[in-house]
Structures are given as C-alpha cells and as structure tokens.
C-alpha cells in the first residue's frame, strides 16, 4: 500500500496501488542514503574494527570501568565514540556506520549496550569472525527470500507495474 504524503492525514485504502517508480521514490525518501555491504567488504570492516578494539582492549576497558556513565559494563555509542576520540583512535565514518549497524543488531538501544558485545561481535579469531559474517549473510538472505515469498503470496497486496 502506498499513499501520497501530500495530505495531512492518511486514508486507509487497501485497493490503492502505485508504480515501481513511485514506490522506489518513497523508499529512497524514507531511507535516505544507504549502502548494502557484500561479504568481502563486511569481512574487511570487521577485521579493521576487531584490530582496533583488541589492540586497545586494556586501556579502553580501564577507561570504561572508571566512568560513572558506564556502570555495570554498559555504555552508549556516543560515549564509545568519544572515548575512541579521546584516545586519538581514528575510525573512519564507514567503520563507525558498520560498528553502529552491528551493535544495533544485538542491542536496539544504542544508548545502553554491553561493552563486551563488541568483542563478541568482532572476535580476534579471523576464521570465527568470517564464519559469523557468512552465517549472518545467509540468514539475512533466507529471511529476505521468505519475506518476498510472503509478499507474493499475500493476495491482499495490489502491485502495479
């Protein structure tokens, strides 16, 4: 179902349809800029993040344990990024986006996640890290296939090409 966003209110009409171009346009407006990652890129990003956090594990852990804002091993993404900057650890924007995505997968509240989750998501062992990424890719791909099949089998949806 696609409705115009020109009105101040929404009228539910299950018979409303739209062309592919309109659907793509609305999707782009809602999603803004996004980029999908292929497995080799994700493996590269995960390795870079893993290297950073394992290289600085002890000083970062000490810093987080000493901060009142990170009680009981929890911290926010903002505090994490501020701490990296305070230690003059440079992480490029693409890696920050990837780190944010992966943290969101395990903790939808980026204002409070467990610091140790970073080491679970980005283990030092390269083979384990790569296997986790490949398994996740296949799981998301299967979910996508199931979702597409469900949409195609839902006769209430009207699709105009």
Image: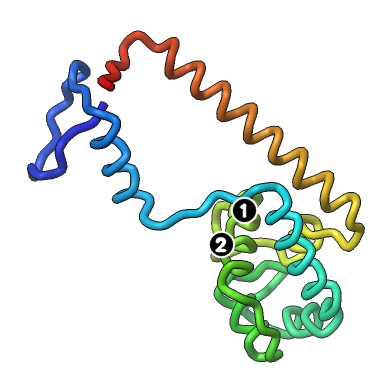
Front position in the image: 55 or 10: 55
In the rendered structure, the answer to whether residue 115 lies left or right of residue 23 reads right
Front position in the image: 148 or 105: 148
Task: Please tell me whether mark 1 sits on a helix, a strand or a loop.
Answer: loop
Q: Find disc 1 in the rendering and name its residue.
A: 107
In the rendered structure, the answer to whether residue 42 lies left or right of residue 152 reads right
Quarter of the image with the N terminus in it: top left
State yes or no: discs 2 and 1 in contact (Cβ < 8 Å): yes
Front position in the image: 72 or 15: 15
Q: Find disc 2 in the rendering and name its residue.
A: 110
Residue 82 percent location from the top left of the image: 59, 83
Residue 122 percent location from the top left of the image: 79, 59
Residue 111 percent location from the top left of the image: 54, 65
Q: Is residue 108 above or below residue 92?
A: above
Q: Please tell me which residue is depicted at 86% across the width and 80% down the height of the picture.
A: 58
Q: Please tell me which residue is depicted at 12% across the width and 29% down the height of the picture.
A: 11
């Amino acid at each position: 179902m696609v409705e115009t966003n020109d009105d101040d209110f929404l009228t539910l009409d299950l018979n409303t349809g739209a062309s592919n171009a309109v659907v793509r346009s609305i999707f782009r407006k809602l999603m803004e800029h996004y980029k999908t990652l292929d497995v080799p890129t994700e493996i590269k990003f995960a390795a870079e993040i893993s290297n950073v956090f394992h290289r600085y594990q002890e000083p970062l852990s000490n810093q987080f344990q000493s901060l009142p804002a990170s009680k009981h091993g929890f911290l926010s993404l903002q505090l994490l990024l501020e701490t990296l900057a305070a230690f003059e650890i440079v992480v490029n924007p693409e890696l920050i986006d990837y780190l944010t995505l992966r943290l969101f997968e395990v903790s939808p509240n980026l204002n409070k996640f467990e610091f140790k989750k970073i080491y679970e998501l980005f283990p030092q062992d390269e083979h384990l890290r790569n296997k986790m990424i490949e398994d996740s890719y296949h799981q998301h791909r299967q979910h996508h296939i199931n979702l597409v099949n469900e949409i195609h089998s839902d006769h209430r949806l009207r699709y105009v090409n």
